[in-house]
Image (cartoon, grey):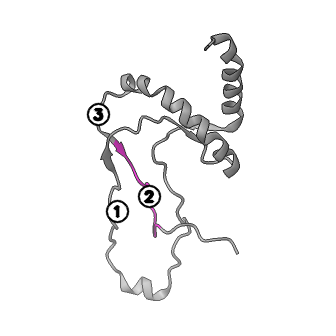
Amino acid sequence: MFSIRESLPRLAAAALLFSAGGCALQTRSTPVAVNIVAIEHDDAMTHRNWERSSALYPGGAVLAGSTRFYLTPDANADARVQQLADVPLFIVNTIFLPVTLFIEAPMTPVTYRGATVPPTFNANPPLPMR
C-alpha cells in the first residue's frame, strides 16, 4: 500500500540528487563564440578600395509546439553527471507534465532559435590555440 510517510525519504533523496547533480531549466539560444581577431590589411587591400558589404545569415528559428520538458541536465556538467541526472529529470518532467498545460496552453506556438551569430568581421569559430 502507498504511504506518503514512506515516500518522503525517497523524495528527499531525489531532491538531494537534483541539487548535487546539476539540473538546469531549458534555455533559449545564446550567442556563439566567433573569431574576434581583425583581418590584417595589406597594401593591395588598401588600393582595391572595395565597397563594404554585409553578409546576411538566416535566422535559424523554428516555430513548433512546446516540448513541455522544462528541466534538462546542465550542459556544462560532466558527461557522467548528465547521464545520472537524465532519468530522474525525465521522471520529474513527466510527473509535472499536467502542470505545464497551465504554463503554456496547448497548441501555443513556441519559437526555438538556432545559433545566434553576433556582428563580426568573418563569423568564423575561434581558432584553436597553438
Q: Provide the secondary structure element on which disc 3 rests.
A: loop
Mark 2–mark 3 contact, CB under 8 Å?
Answer: no
Q: What amino acid is found at the position of numbered circle 1 in the picture?
A: Tyr
Circle 2 sits on which residue? 117
Locate the N terminus by quadrant. top right
Report x, y in % for residue 84: 67, 43
Q: Secondary structure at mark 1?
A: loop
In this picture, residue 112 sits left or right of residue 80: left
Mark 3: few/some/many CA within 10 Å (<14, 14-19, 20+): few
Tell me the distance, in whole angstroms, between the alpha carbons under discs 2 and 3: 27 Å
Q: Quadrant of residue 105?
A: top left
Residue under pointer 1: 57
**Residue located farthest toward the bottom when viewing the structure as drawn:** 44
Q: Quadrant of the C terminus?
A: bottom right
Q: Looking at the picture, which amino acid does disc 2 mark?
A: Val
Q: Residue at horizontal 32%, vertical 60%?
A: 58
Residue displayed at 58% across by 37% down: 24
Q: Is residue 130 above or below residue 18?
A: below
Label 3 sits on residue: 108
Q: Is residue 90 magenta?
A: no
Q: Position of residue 103 (x, y in %)?
A: 39, 25
Q: Is 109 above or below relative to 98?
A: below
First in residue order: circle 2 vs circle 3 = 3
Which residue is the extreme one toward the front? 1
Residue 104 or residue 123, whichever sits in front: 104
Q: Earlier in the sequence, mark 1 or mark 3?
A: 1
